[in-house]
Image: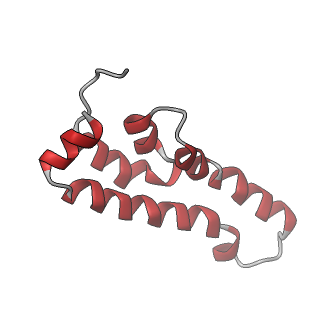
């Protein structure tokens, strides 16, 4: 049982700034969160795409990370706009 208080502002900031690698998911749910690992897997996926298709356009090579970053921005909006009572019920 995790008794640490989770700060809504910090979680939103982490999602906005480092959401592409899932730092906010680890802050909120710990390292057992599969969606956080999916965010983190976007970084090696970019390396694999760059190695497999070095002649491809850079936007296609960075597509896994771009999608992860956009998802992090969306999660920042969801977390930031969540009502305080729902936030406390979910994370605290």
Q: In this view, does 49 lie to the left or right of 11?
A: right
Q: Position of residue 88 (x, y in %)?
A: 19, 39
Q: How many marks?
A: 0
Q: Where is residue 40 in the image (x, y as percent from the top left)?
A: 59, 47
Q: Which residue is drawn at 15% across and 54% down?
A: 83
Quadrant position of the C terminus in the picture: top left
Q: Residue at x 45, y 66 (%)?
A: 70
Q: Where is residue 19 in the image (x, y as percent from the top left)?
A: 44, 52
Q: Which residue is drawn at 53% across and 32% down?
A: 31
Vertical relation: 47 (above or below) 3? below
| Extreme-right residue of the structure | 52
Quadrant position of the N terminus in the picture: top left
Q: Which residue is drawn at 71% across and 50% down?
A: 44
Determine which quarter of the picture holds residue 76: bottom left
Q: In this view, does 73 lie to the left or right of 9?
A: right
Vertical relation: 61 (above or below) 88? below
Q: In this view, does 41 lie to the left or right of 79?
A: right
Q: Position of residue 39 (x, y in %)?
A: 56, 52
Front in this rendered view, residue 74 or 56:
74
């Amino acid at each position: 049982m995790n008794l640490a208080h989770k700060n809504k502002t910090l979680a939103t900031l982490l999602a906005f700034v480092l959401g592409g690698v899932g730092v906010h998911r680890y802050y909120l749910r710990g390292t057992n969160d599969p969606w956080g690992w999916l965010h983190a897997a976007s970084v090696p996926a970019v390396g694999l795409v760059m190695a497999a298709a070095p002649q491809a356009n850079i936007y296609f090579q960075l597509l896994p990370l771009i999608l992860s970053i956009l998802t992090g921005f969306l999660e920042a909006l969801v977390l930031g706009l969540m009502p305080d009572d729902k936030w406390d019920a979910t994370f605290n």
